[in-house]
Amino acid sequence: MESLKDNMMAISSDEFENNIMADAEEFSPAIQQQDSGTHKVPEDDFKAVAYKQEWNEVSKLPADYIRREDMEIKDVAMKHVLPFLPGKSLMKFRAVSNEWNHWIVCPLLAYQQSTSFQKLSGYFYQVVDVDFQSDPNFLSLDHSANGIPNPSLGFLPERIKVLSSSSGLLLCQGLESYYVCNPLTEDWKRIPPHQYYHGSDPAVILAFDPQGNIESYFHLVAAVPLLDQPVVFFEIYSSQSNSWSRSSSECLELEDTTLVGGGLYMKGMAYWSTTSNGVLAFDVKNEVAAVLRVPIPPGRYGALTQVKDELSYVTVYNDCGDVFMLDIYGGMDMSLNHSVCINLGHKKSCQTLEEDPFIDNGTVLCSVLPCINSGDDIVVICTTERIYLYYLSGQKVETFMTPGQLNPKRRFIPYTNSLAAIHELKN
């Protein structure tokens, strides 16, 4: 043991670095140095890219390689902090320096940021109509950090309706086509025509998992009810094959009910609410469907929400005055997990209570907005005047102004401010 230790100590730092580089060349035969100093990663290894690689002749390491002992605060921030920031903030930081600009526009950072930043940034909201007369708009929870350049999505080739959101990407419906876009980068792709009729307000969900998905593959899952029959079948689009296919799975458990558009996708599962207070669930990978029954009182409706990294169905009602009651259902049987009594400080004058048509006998009409948020357990409550973010763990309330009166036809789609790329579709 002593001789081994002495031999290790005798190895110089230069020899150690040379050994590392030799090992790297031995185990990375796919990386070949060209005469011009240009390196290529073959198509089999992710995607073909060429870049100018400069070498430090002293250390025999890449010039942009920084030893841990030589790292400065700006280097730590650039490599280890930027991936956890919202996309709009990263766009601002491009002005810091050329080095930061080159790193922020790098596809690798876009991938890292899309997997690291999964917080709720705001909502796209829009009145759902058949003739596409209403443009979408965006409600940011932090204008300085989570905004987008074109809230109406005017960069798309036609007027659209926002249907779904997943990890920073949006699914939109045009007159005859679906579009998948990133509203921050304004990158978009037109989806080829589907085989079956999905309806004027289709129940289609965008399924996009950035984790481990460097090619940015995504799926669209359409739940299609058969006319006059209690049967729902599924048509699935894959960006990898750029084609639609009908799943062999069908749901026969939905009778006298209608699917509610604007479902959620999380952890490999697509979910839709129904008018009968059930939840239609579909495993995208294994193509298995199931119906979860939510035992809520008649006449009360809620929304699908992520609570403690699991799917929950949350309802809210105004008990009296400023007091609101939250009921949270979850688990495999979607049973009532717990109820929360909160005071939102919703102050209203007597004159407002008499004139507001959305208030009945002094009770404020309210609803829960769908929410997917990694890290913080948030329930989003919408009333006639305000939107409240209630943090379940810290019992803290944040208040935002409601964009106009509470309209049952207005749909809210949760959104995450991400640099996520869109897979390049095959022709």
Image: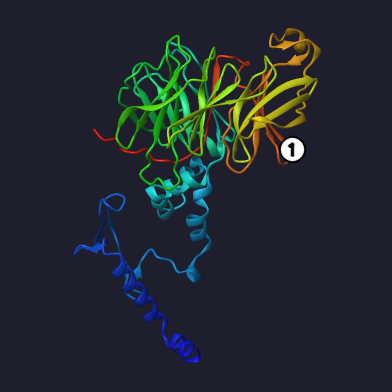
Instruction: Please indicate whether residue 251 sits to the left or right of residue 307 in the image.
Output: left
Residue type (three-letter) at the residue carrying disc 1: Gln
- Could you say which is closer to the camera, residue 269 or residue 60? 269
SS of the residue under disc 1: loop
- From this viewpoint, which residue is outermost toward the front? 252
Q: Taking 27 as reference, is 269 above or below it?
A: above
- Could you say which is closer to the camera, residue 101 or residue 50? 50
Name the residue located 78 percent from the left edge and 22 percent from the top edge.
Answer: 347
Instruction: Please indicate whether residue 44 sits to the left or right of residue 278 in the image.
Output: left
Whether residue 152 is visible to the viewer of this picture, yes or no, is no
Q: Taking 24 as reference, is 185 above or below it?
A: above
- Residue 106, given in percent of the width and then of the height, sits at 38, 49
Instruction: Please indicate whether residue 311 sits to the left or right of residue 223 in the image.
Output: right
- Could you say which is closer to the camera, residue 259 or residue 40? 259
Name the residue located 75 percent from the left edge and 26 percent from the top edge.
Answer: 325
- Residue 203, given in percent of the width and then of the height, sits at 46, 21
Residue annotated with mark 1: 395
- Residue 316, given in percent of the width and then of the height, sits at 70, 24
Q: Hey, which quadrant is residue 67 in on the image?
A: bottom left
- Residue 383, given in percent of the width and then of the height, sits at 67, 21
Name the residue located 31 percent from the left edge and 50 percent from the top edge.
Answer: 46
The quarter in which the C terminus is drawn is top left
Q: Hey, which quadrant is residue 372 in on the image?
A: top right
- From this viewpoint, which residue is outermost toward the bottom? 3
